Amino acid sequence: MLQRLFALTMFTITVLWLVVSYMPHLHAELPIIAFASGSGWQSPSGAILLIAFIALQVWLLCTTVAAIRTSQHSNATAFRLKLGAEFFWSALPILMTVALAWASYALWLNRASF
């Protein structure tokens, strides 16, 4: 019961955050994050962090697939995990990160003109 209440609370907070962040009259009161133009460390550090995140996610994906295959070969199945579902939910963050990086690539190229 407590877990459901916690999940409902987190879901409500997330929905309220999304709704409030898109309300025009509250948008001016939200903090704006901006970087000073001309700083040369942001693009390389962003690329390094993106590569590190993708490497970590790929490692987690390989570890998950290996753990599921090991548990499927043994008779002791403590968890009823499905390889396809686990692969999908493990690969999804990687795909989303690459898609966001690709979509924002033009923005980062034009960042110097701000």
Image: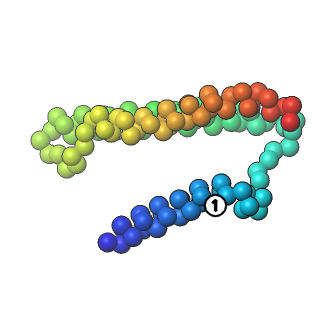
Question: Is residue 38 something one can see in this rendering?
Answer: yes
Task: Identify which residue, 1 or 68, lies in the foreground.
Answer: 1
Q: Is residue 49 above or below residue 10?
A: above
20 with respect to 6 (left or right): right
How far from the left and from the top, in percent, is residue 3?
36, 67
How far from the left and from the top, in percent, is residue 19?
59, 58
Q: Disc 1 residue type?
A: Val
How far from the left and from the top, in percent, is residue 11?
47, 61
Q: Quadrant of the C terminus?
A: top right
For the residue carrying disc 1, how many other residues have a C-alpha within 10 Å: few (<14), some (14-19), or many (20+)? some
Q: Is residue 81 above or below residue 10?
A: above
How far from the left and from the top, in percent, is residue 41?
78, 36
**What residue sits right under mark 1 in the picture?**
20
Callout 1: SS: helix
The residue at the point 53 percent across, 64 percent down is 13
Question: Is residue 47 something one can see in this rendering?
Answer: no
